[in-house]
Image: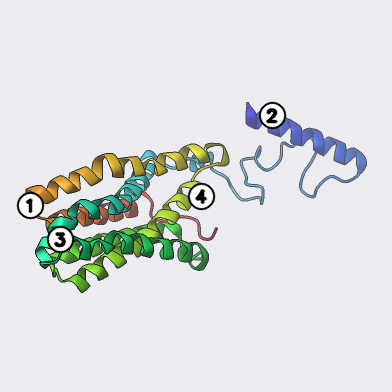
């Protein structure tokens, strides 16, 4: 009904413009406009089914937010075990969560300002892959500098994923549904707090803290692969 109403309004404006001799080029009286003819405003074919991303795409983007968001909550409960492994007091490794947050805060605006020409789906995919590999690094080494590099890399990749995932969700939805779609993706933070972070902490108790980190990394790597399947490309730019 909304589209028919818009078409009638455009037709009325075209009739008035024709009567005044100011009708736009390519628009005739009684024409509802490009949208009514199944075209975009610039005359390209328009498929209304592309206005709403699929459920798989929305869930995958929400999972990406959950994975990288969990990184903020996973480190703190692991600090005693990390300190014990390094043979240092807990206070000496307490800077790791702050390092993660700092890397995220630096990377996020850098992505928004400097990488606008890269497809956002590619940014999310590669950001997830880098995030996942970073969390697997404790399996290769467990020194203090190595862990600092791991946390900094994971935070930077999280700063790539988060703004790109939000923008991608907005790009792939029509204006009328944009808030709903973006809200579902942002709900990944709730999943991070209520599901992913507790499961990772439980995995650390069951195996070890490097195993828990690797579990979070594996989740991100799997999501990167899923995103390549459900969303091979997206619009480029802002």
Is residue 238 shown left or right of residue 83? right
Closer to the chain start, of discs 1 and 4, is: 4
| Mark 3 neighbour density, 10 Å: few (under 14) some (14–19) many (20 or more) | many
Identify the residue shown where x is 42% and y is 52%: 165
The type of colouring in the image is: rainbow
Are the residues tagged 3 and 1 within 8 Å (C-beta)?
no
Closer to the chain start, of discs 3 and 1, is: 3
* CA gap, disc 1 and disc 4: 41 Å
Closer to the chain start, of discs 1 and 2, is: 2
Is residue 227 shown left or right of residue 30? left
Identify the residue shown where x is 14% and y is 68%: 142
Label 2 sits on residue: 5
| Image quarter of residue 124 | bottom left
* CA gap, disc 2 and disc 4: 25 Å
Q: Secondary structure at mark 2?
A: helix
Identify the residue shown where x is 84% and y is 35%: 15
Which of 179/226 is in front? 179
Label 3 sits on residue: 82
Label 1 sits on residue: 207
Q: Secondary structure at mark 1?
A: loop
* CA gap, disc 3 and disc 1: 13 Å
Checking the image for residue 172, the label placed there is: none
- Total tally of numbered discs in the picture: 4
Closer to the chain start, of discs 2 and 3, is: 2
Nearer to us of marks 1 and 4 is 1
Which of 69/61 is in front? 69
Q: Is residue 179 above or below residue 233?
A: above
Is residue 4 shown left or right of residue 237? right
């Amino acid at each position: 009904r909304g589209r028919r109403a818009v078409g009638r309004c455009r037709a009325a404006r075209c009739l008035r413009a024709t009567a005044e001799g100011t009708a736009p080029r390519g628009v005739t009286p009684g024409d509802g406009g490009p949208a009514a003819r199944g075209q975009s405003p610039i005359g390209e074919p328009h498929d209304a089914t592309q206005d709403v991303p699929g459920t798989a795409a929305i869930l995958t983007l929400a999972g990406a937010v959950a994975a990288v968001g969990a990184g903020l909550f996973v480190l703190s409960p692991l600090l005693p075990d990390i300190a014990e492994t390094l043979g240092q007091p807990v206070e000496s490794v307490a800077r790791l969560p702050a390092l993660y947050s700092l890397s995220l805060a630096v990377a996020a605006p850098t992505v928004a300002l400097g990488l606008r020409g890269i497809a956002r789906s590619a940014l999310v995919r590669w950001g997830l892959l880098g995030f996942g590999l970073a969390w697997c690094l404790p399996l290769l080494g467990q020194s203090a500098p190595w862990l600092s590099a791991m946390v900094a890399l994971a935070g930077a990749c999280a700063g790539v994923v988060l703004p790109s995932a939000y923008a991608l969700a907005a790009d792939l939805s029509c204006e009328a549904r944009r808030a709903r779609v973006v809200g579902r993706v942002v709900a990944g933070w709730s999943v991070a707090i209520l599901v992913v972070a507790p499961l990772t902490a439980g995995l650390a108790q069951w195996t070890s803290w490097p195993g828990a980190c690797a579990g979070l990394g594996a989740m991100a790597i799997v999501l990167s692969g899923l995103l390549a399947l459900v969303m091979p490309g997206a619009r480029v730019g802002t």
